Image (cartoon, rainbow, N blue to C red):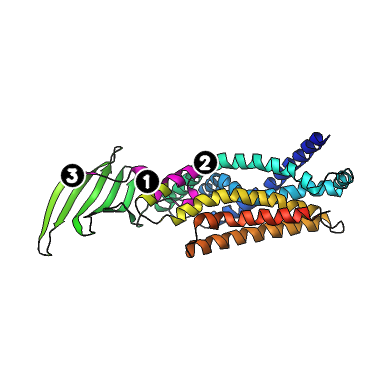
Amino acid sequence: MILIIDRYLAFRVFIGLCIATAMLLPLFGFLDLLEQLDDVGQGTYRVQDAFLYTALMMPRRFSQLAPFIALLGTVIALGGLAKNLELTALQIGGVSPVRVSMAPLAVGFVLLIFIAILEQFIAPKFQQEAILNKVVARDQSVQLGKNLGIWTRNERNILRIGEMVNAKKAENVEILHFDKNGSLLTYTYARYANINDNNLWELHEVISKKFGSSKENIESVSKNSIYWKSFVNPNNISTLIKSPESLSPYDLFQHVSYLKNTGQEADAYELALWRKAGGAFTTIAMLLLSIPFVFGSSRTGFATKLVFSVMAGISVYLLDQIIANIGLLLHFPPILTALFPGIALIIVANIWLRTIP
């Protein structure tokens, strides 16, 4: 009997999540489209490009909205059951609110698996394609990281790239090599470099300076081309010019390891990585929070409960953003900053759920 009830509740929650998705995704997609239409006319960016950008961003938007969808969808599903007195019948039959929450949680875990696949294989690829298409259309070039000045280093070398023309060509390349005491040994400038798959760079129009023990002892040599064994591969360079939020969990993990191994600041990328895990906790928390909303006072109408759930979802989203920005600014541990909101909400929801008679 319980198994049949679980299946029925899970089905209703699934339908509720579909309804919430059908409500929220087009709404936020429309808002994204309005924002993109403001850029129409810049370069060759056209109306159809704005529509394409919005469509390609939909997987990322769904992933971002997942906690809100979980809350609203579960309130819609269980609220409908409460309105028809089905939840009252379950309570009379001895099914507690905690037991009722098992079905939404089961659906929630399936949702999390879907989001994990989306985050790893689909959303990053689509988002990066959307951003690249827009850059190409607006600037009428395929230059990546233009005017950004990409910097990276390892223990004894600093590399600066003025511009990435494409994945295989860099312009205005500067290489600084230091000794173990931190003194500059050589400075190399190349007007452009061809990047090979084996990390062997072919530098062209090169000026190289070698520094001696005194300021006067400087050797300067110019060459048409030289080969340089780089400490950074093309994948790491392409990651450096992408926003942390646009990377997959695996790419974030790889890049965080690379930055830490080379002694560089990794907080932004590490926070983005842990926030993807934190999103899972927040989604579960939202599912649990929806139960007390539905089992609240019978005098409170369904529409009112729906409004309260929307306000709660917006509040949680804003709180999560504020905590993330404060954590990054004050250099709190990224894992704590990312996971604290979701775990705290799960604890609050669990306590609240157990107070319902």
Question: Residue sitting at 75 percent across and 39 percent down?
Answer: 10
Q: Which residue is mark 1?
A: 236
Q: Which mark is residue 120?
A: 2
Q: Dots 3 and 1: beta carbons under 8 Å?
A: no
Q: Nearer the viewer, mark 3 or mark 1?
A: 1
User: Which of disc 1 and disc 2 is earlier in sequence?
Assistant: 2
Taking the image as shown, residue 247 lies to the left or right of residue 187, namely right
**Labels 2 and 3 touching (C-beta < 8 A):** no
Q: Which mark is residue 278?
A: none
**Residue position marked by numbered label 3 in the rendering:** 226
Q: Is residue 46 visible?
A: no
Q: CA distance from mark 2 to mark 3?
A: 39 Å
Residue sitting at x 9%, y 61%: 217
Q: Which residues are magenta?
A: 227-254
> CA–CA distance between discs 2 and 1?
17 Å
Estimate the x, y position of residue 170 in percent, counting from the top left: 29, 48
Q: Is any part of residue 31 visible from this angle?
A: yes
Kind of residue sitting beneath label 1: Asn
Within-10-Å neighbours for mark 2: few <14, some 14–19, many 20+: some
| Quadrant in the rendering for residue 233 | top left
